[in-house]
Amino acid sequence: MYRFHPSVKWTAGYPDRQQIVSQITQLWKRYGLQERTKFNTQVNSVRQDKYGRWIINDDSSFGHFDGVLAAVGTCGDPKMPRLPNQEAFKGEIFHSSKLDGKTAAGKKVIIVGGGASAVEALEFVVHTDATSTSVLARNHLLMDPENLLKRFFYRDLEDLAPTSDGLFTETPMVNSDIFHQIRAQKAEWLRGDIIRFTEEGMRFRQRAKGVPKGGPGREIEVKADMVIMATGYERPSLAFLPDECFQEDYQPPK
């Protein structure tokens, strides 16, 4: 997981939540991070004093530091787009980050989105015994960057495989469990564009393979009692850093 902490051994091809949390906990304890961490503290500014040391929030009680690492990641606040006629839907709507304590038992579920958050949401839905799950995605199901393992992963699911647009032009998923769920008929992956909410689900324009986003397709209604918006996150702000940190060639992480 970390180059300075190489003793990670996963028990499967893709680690599950328990394995990841376990490794982080071991690292946390090994390096004594509990005593080095201050929780529930929003950083609004960092600046250097006259000696070149960094001060947090203009409050020297936090300490004086020789350097600052802005490790804010790429996921900020949840993106929660409002879709046409959303107020008409009679079921529940959640962002994929708000599923703790929820259950999909006995429910028909729609997952909006086709990235890593959608796969995570699908695992939640399947493991809480949903009646059915439909993933509504604008694009194909991308497992490897250049179809290098197409025959291995897709096999009978050729229609979900991407057309080749070049090496590393898109971000692949890092969990093949979705193929097992589709083959077991516990989930379906529908490529197309959302038209609007209805009282009982969503109107959806299902596109054939190779038809671009927004292109023609067959209009269907997908029933649901619960909709999970796996629509990602806003980029975290780096506004707390001084302006001089952002030089002309600066590019945020993708």
Image (cartoon, rainbow, N blue to C red):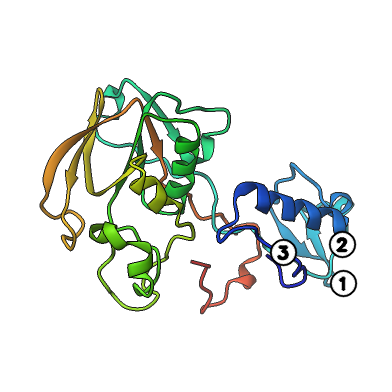
Q: Nearer the viewer, residue 76 or 161?
A: 161
* Percent position of residue 32, x then y: 88, 55
Q: Is residue 237 found left or right of 197 in the rendered image?
A: right
Q: Are marks 3 and 2 in contact (CB under 8 Å)?
A: no
Q: Amino acid at mark 3?
A: Val
* Percent position of residue 146, x then y: 35, 75
Q: Is residue 147 found left or right of 239 in the rendered image?
A: left
Residue appearing at x 42%, y 65% in the figure: 171
* Percent position of residue 41, x then y: 74, 45
Residue appearing at x 77%, y 71% in the figure: 4
Q: Nearer the viewer, residue 13 or 33?
A: 13
Closer to the N terminus: mark 3 or mark 2? Answer: 3
Mark whose residue sits in front, 3 or 2: 3
Q: Which residue is mark 3?
A: 8
What is the quadrant of the N terminus in the image? bottom right
- Alpha carbon of mark 3 to alpha carbon of mark 2: how far? 34 Å
As displayed, is residue 134 above or below residue 168?
Answer: above
* Percent position of residue 16, x then y: 59, 51
Q: Residues within 10 Å of mark 2 (few under 14, many from 20)?
A: some
Q: Which residue is mark 1?
A: 51
